[in-house]
Structure formats: C-alpha cells, structure tokens
Image (cartoon, helix red, strand yellow):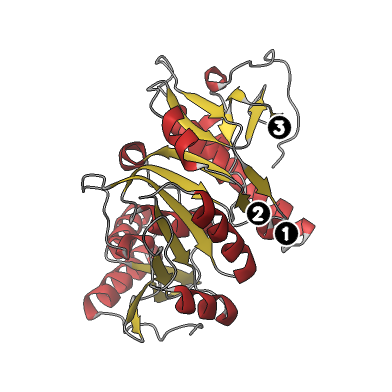
Amino acid sequence: MTGPFAPPPVPPEIDALARRRAEARAARDWHAADVLRADIEAAGWKVIDQGLRFRLEPAHPPDVEVAGRTRYGSSASVPSRLDDAPSAVATVVLLADRWPEDLARALDGLRAHAPSGTHVVVVANDPTPEQADALESADGTDPLAGAAPEQVWTSAPLGHAAAQNAGIRRAAGEIVILLDTSVEPTGDIVTPVVEALRDPSVAVVGGWGIASGDLRHFDDAGPGDVDAIEAYLQAFRRADYAARGPLDEHFRFYRNLDIWWSLVLRDGGEHGSHRRAVRLELPATRHAHRGYTSVSEPERERLSRRNFYRIIDRFGQRRDLLRAPAPPARRGPVTG
C-alpha cells in the first residue's frame, strides 16, 4: 500500500501559536515571530507563509497501521536500540524503495557469505507495489545468517538520510554497515570490516574511498587511508553514531552524504587528533547505481551541489582533516 495518508487536524493550541506569529510578523516583530515558529516546530508542525496568511502542516507524515504493520512517518518515530547493549557483532542496513531485484541480489550475497549472527535491517522506504510484494513474501520466511532480516516500513518517502537513520535506530550490532543495494557481496564483507574497526584510530571503513587536496574536488583512492568512504559500503561503530549522529536529514538525496558523515566521524576538533578512514579490499561487486542512473543529469547535479554546500558550510576550511592537503592557492569550482 502506497500513497499519502490524510493529515491529522491542526490542534487548537498550534493554530493559536500560528495566529500569534502572524500578528508578530504583521507588526514586524521578527524576534517574536522566530520564537513562535520554533515553538510550532518543536510541537511537530511547520508553518508555511503565504503573504500575510499561513497554512500549517505536520512536520512529517503520521505513523499508521497497515495490515497489522506500523509504518513510520519519521526516523524519530522508529523505536531505537541505540541505548541497548549490542546483541550482534554487526548490523547491515539496506534501503528498499524500488528495484526489488537489486535488493534480492544484495540479500542473496549476504545470505551466502555473512557470518552467523549478522543482523540485517531492511528499510522499506514507501516501496513500490512490486518491492512491497517482494518484501511481504520474504518477511519472516527468508532467513539470513540464522534469522530473517528485520524490516522497517515508512508511511511516506523519507529522504535518504532520514531513511538511513530509521534503519540505524534498529541496529543491534556493535558495528553498522550501510550497504547500497547496487553492491553484491561475493564473499564475507562483515568480518574484515569488524576487524578493521577494532583499531581505535579508525573511524570509518568501506570498500570504496576518495581523497581530496582541497575539500572541493574528490577523486577515487586506492586501498589504505583515504579522506572519506563512499556510500556503496560504509561501516562505523554504533557508539559513534549515537555520539555524533544522527545523519543530517537535510540530505534528502544520497550524493555527498557519505563525505559529510565520514568527516563527522573522523573529526577530532581543529586542534585534536583526527581518526582515520580506511578503504579495504572487500569481496563485493558494484552494479549500476539506480539512485544515480534514475535521475536526470541536470537534476542530479542540482541536488548534488546543494548537498555539497552542506559539506562546505561545516568543513570548507578544515583542510586539517585531509591526508595530503594541496597548497592553499589551489581552488576550483565546487563539484559534487
């Protein structure tokens, strides 16, 4: 079942706050208007200005029950295991919205090679009917590493970071592995990742990495220390996510979130000791990345650039995070 759900009615107290805010805006009392907006947003609503008028919408879709299954409207609605003691060595998180054959291929690879006890979470991000049918038929009947993959369903499409947050909140493993469904494991990808993260100087590892000299241009990098780990397969400690996360949900499109999160995990402060990002040689094959190929080039570049500015805003001057920064004079256009 897909499609929008009817929004809940606006509570009288929220409507009253919005009317007071409209009065403050009319009086050009911008500080009061900002305070009232913050109160409205803290209560789970957003106000959309339309000239001197406004309308109110829920900040996120509602949680709903569909055929006995809870479908969550936001990542924050998903019950969290982050405060629980780990009960698995690693949790693999996959996002499923379209392309059931890609998800099946990734799960088959994990099923064939993941060590016993690996925990798998599949986020059904408002999936297409075909993807939903595949997930429903597999639910509870398709064991992987000794147990059926856990499923988290949403009531509307969440942005990429929000959907990842929803899955990570269910992680039972000490290590979290974000695995894109374009990647097919051809061997055990879990054990090498877990071993690499036993080194406290390492913050993030994965199968593909990139390096930069100026935080504006990034290039593919070989195995070993890199500046960031790409999202095809990106692994980190659950404890680090609890301490430094969640992922910034302004990243609705996937591209460049991996750079931002790698730098967040590595950052030891401007005068601290930074941790490492390490690219590993892992037994996995990359196939066509549908999140890339399904979006037109102009739209892809627009969304990528907007995401990249979020990196620049936070880390644009942090050349100390780079393995081999270029001389300060080197500059160029922002790329995604």
Task: Indicate the position of residue 258 as horizontal and vertical percent values.
Answer: 55, 42
Considering the image in quadrants, where does the C terminus appear? top right
Sequence-wise first label, 2 or 3: 3
Sequence-wise first label, 1 or 3: 3
| Amino acid of disc 2 | Leu
Circles 1 and 2 in contact, beta carbons < 8 Å: yes
At mark 2, the secondary structure is: helix
At mark 1, the secondary structure is: helix
Question: In which image quadrant can residue 6 be found?
Answer: bottom left
Per the image, the residue denoted by label 1 is 299
Residue 220, numbered label? 3
Decide: is 72 above or below 12.
above
Task: Indicate the position of residue 334 as horizontal and vertical percent values.
Answer: 71, 36
| Amino acid of disc 3 | Asp
For label 3, count other residues whose C-alpha is less than 10 Å away and answer few (under 14), some (14-19) or many (20+): few
At mark 3, the secondary structure is: strand
Decide: is 68 above or below 288.
below
Per the image, the residue denoted by label 2 is 303
Residue 22 appears in the figure: yes
| Amino acid of disc 1 | Glu
For label 2, count other residues whose C-alpha is less than 10 Å away and answer few (under 14), some (14-19) or many (20+): some
Query: Image check: 251 left or right of 223?
Result: left
Camera-nearest residue between 327 and 99? 99
Q: CA distance from mark 2 to mark 3?
A: 21 Å
Question: In which image quadrant can residue 245 be found?
Answer: top left
Q: Give the total number of marks visible in the rendering.
A: 3
Circles 2 and 3 in contact, beta carbons < 8 Å: no
Query: Image check: 35 left or right of 126?
Result: left
Task: Indicate the position of residue 8 as horizontal and vertical percent values.
Answer: 33, 83
Task: Indicate the position of residue 319 as horizontal and vertical percent values.
Answer: 57, 20
Which residue is the extreme one toward the right? 297
